[in-house]
Image (cartoon, rainbow, N blue to C red):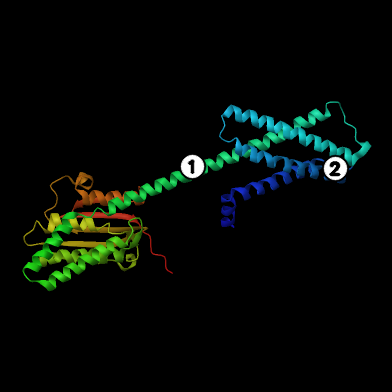
Amino acid sequence: MLSNWKLLLEDRNRFFWVLQVAGWSGYALVHYIGSLMHEMRDIYALILLLGAYAGFLLTVPLRYLYRKIWDVSPWLLILIVLAASYLSAALWAVIDNATYWEIYKFGFTPDSKWFYFKNTIAKFYIMLSWSGLYFGIKYYQMLQDEKQKALVATSMAHQAQLKMLRYQLNPHFLFNTLNAISTLILVEENELANRMMSKLSLFLRFSLDNEPIKKIPLEREIDALMLYLDIEKVRFDDRLKVTLDIEEDVKQALVPSLFLQPLIENSVKYAIAKLEEGGEIIISAQRNDDDLVIVVADNGPGSTKPLDSLSTQGGVGLANTRERLQALYGRNYSFTLTANTPRGLRIEIRIPLEQVEQA
């Protein structure tokens, strides 16, 4: 039912004819109800129907006239509308009087010499009301069109922003990975170099295949992260340890694609790479009421900057993730940084829990 109404509103021509028929039918019905005490109401009903039909036909040319003069100056538009409404009313009054005369013959006598003029003026108000409704509906439709265009433009800008943020792949990651592959080839570790290249290819393919404006199951996000971490493990060997703690009931929760990768990259760069003995990255996810809570923690040296300002001034990775979350969820998210125990940095992200729809 709603879709039928939507189709009707979108088809402006059909919408006009529906309103035209409904409006003039309502005009005839209201006048008939008011004439129920008329002693010749059956004949009078016929007169009302013919009058409404005449009004229906006379207002159709007005529609095409108003289309032609739509872009003229306001004062000229008002003058043309007044003139067209009066001429249509006068013609309608002539037709109405002819109908009275034809049906009543010599039984109809005007109650005063101003009868025809007053009839014309009454019909002028009706025509003027029709014109006002026409322009009101047209201006409303134009306003809705402008709002729709503004929404489309905002949506396109929003998508462009998300794509820009999403495709800000850290060039250091690609440089370090390709450099590591080159080194492995030089030392004739061809099998390891080939495995690393395969992981990089899969990671980049995943990155290109998943639109930044769409969300993916958390399970797929973790799989992509493990591709990235497997690449880094080739560089760091046993110095990089990864621990996953993902609750089963949130594995199908929807998250922005690769939104955790910049955070993991920060942990590798500022935590693992700074420690000779290496370190550990812990990724956990759980449900908290209607929210999904994801934590990325490391046991690195932590930050020398104040944690309150780190999320906005702590480099591209943190700012990028925060901006993407804000673009996608507005104010309905949280992004907090705290010191990890016994050392390191802890990032907690809280977003609305959205589950993948089961087919």
Determine the CA span between mark 1 and mark 2.
46 Å
Query: Which residue position is annotated with label 2?
Result: 44
Q: Is residue 136 left or right of residue 146?
A: right
Residue 226 visible in the picture: no
Question: In this view of the protein, which residue sits in the foreground, 238 or 343?
Answer: 238
Q: Percent position (x, y) of residue 264?
A: 20, 58
Q: Residues within 10 Å of mark 2 (few under 14, many from 20)?
A: some
Asked if residue 111 is positioned above or below residue 297 in the image, the reply reads: above
Which residue is found at the position 32% from the left and 66% from the top?
A: 251
Marks 1 and 2 close (CB-CB < 8 Å): no
Q: Secondary structure at mark 2?
A: helix
The mark nearer the N terminus, 1 or 2, is 2
Residue type at mark 1 is Glu
Query: Which residue position is annotated with label 1?
Result: 146
Question: In this view of the protein, which residue sits in the foreground, 44 or 36?
Answer: 44
Q: Quadrant of residue 48?
A: top right
